[in-house]
Image: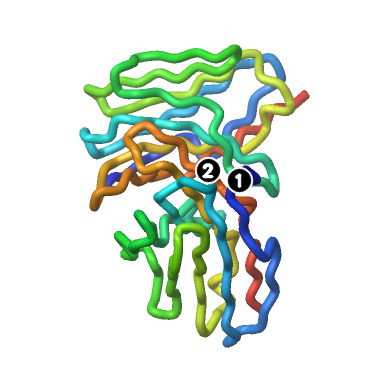
Amino acid sequence: DAGVIQSPRHEVTEMGQEVTLRCKPISGHNSLFWYRQTMMRGLELLIYFNNNVPIDDSGMPEDRFSAKMPNASFSTLKIQPSEPRDSAVYFCASSLNGANTEAFFGQGTRLTVV
Amino acid sequence: GENVEQHPSTLSVQEGDSAVIKCTYSDSASNYFPWYKQELGKRPQLIIDIRSNVGEKKDQRIAVTLNKTAKHFSLHITETQPEDSAVYFCAAITLSGGSYIPTFGRGTSLIVHP
């Protein structure tokens, strides 16, 4: 398996534009997490899915953020409209849902909103 | 929910010295504690983990200790090398909504001076 795959690796967009980040989890993993990483706040959990169902989105900062997981092999995180303070590295991670299982991270998407 | 505190935020050592990073957690139900290393511009990757039925685990120059009573765990790196320079994250895994969720500390930036 190629691991968790995210795209794009880098995204530069203008304030107000819609941004869509994509993630392909490891095949067979049934939990998927979206994290945002900044210097100030570290790794923040935005939302997680279990068996494609969103379980907790309380970490999503605002209504401008939304996430979907239409099937077991694909998830998106959308920001509409984007703002400069959304600039961060966004990581997707997946795991086998279990008490002692490792979360595997994708390479991340570095988002810059100007 | 779970809260993980990590200290220090920055740690600077000379090559060959030891480094210790400490974390505390709040949810006594957490039972799995992984440590991740994130090199500059890369994804976090698991380097060692410890389960709640174990007090200490060692892997070459890296060791982790866990005190469940006090709810704290630590990462110890001996004979540090420049390639150990990275950001280290501790995490606690907690069951929430039927999913096992990693909650991360804020990270420790370790700098090893040659």
- Total labels drawn: 2
* Quadrant position of residue A5: bottom right
Chain of the residue displaying label 2: A
Q: Earlier in the sequence, mark 1 or mark 2?
A: 1
Secondary structure state at the residue bearing disc 2: strand
Q: Which disc, if any, is residue B93?
A: none
Asked if marks 1 and 2 touch (Cβ < 8 Å), the reply is yes
Q: What residue type is labelled 1?
A: Gly
Residue furthest to the bottom in view is: A16
Q: In this view, does B63 lie above or below A93?
A: above
The residue nearer to you, when weighing A69 against B72, is: A69
Separation of residues labelled 1 and 2 (CA atoms): 8 Å
Identify which residue is drawn at 44% across, 75% down. A65
Secondary structure state at the residue bearing disc 1: loop
Q: Position of residue A52 (x, y in %)?
A: 38, 60
Question: Can you identify the residue that label 1 sits on?
Answer: A3
Identify which residue is drawn at 58% across, 37% down. B45
Q: Which amino acid does label 2 sit on?
A: Phe
Question: Can you identify the residue that label 2 sits on?
Answer: A104
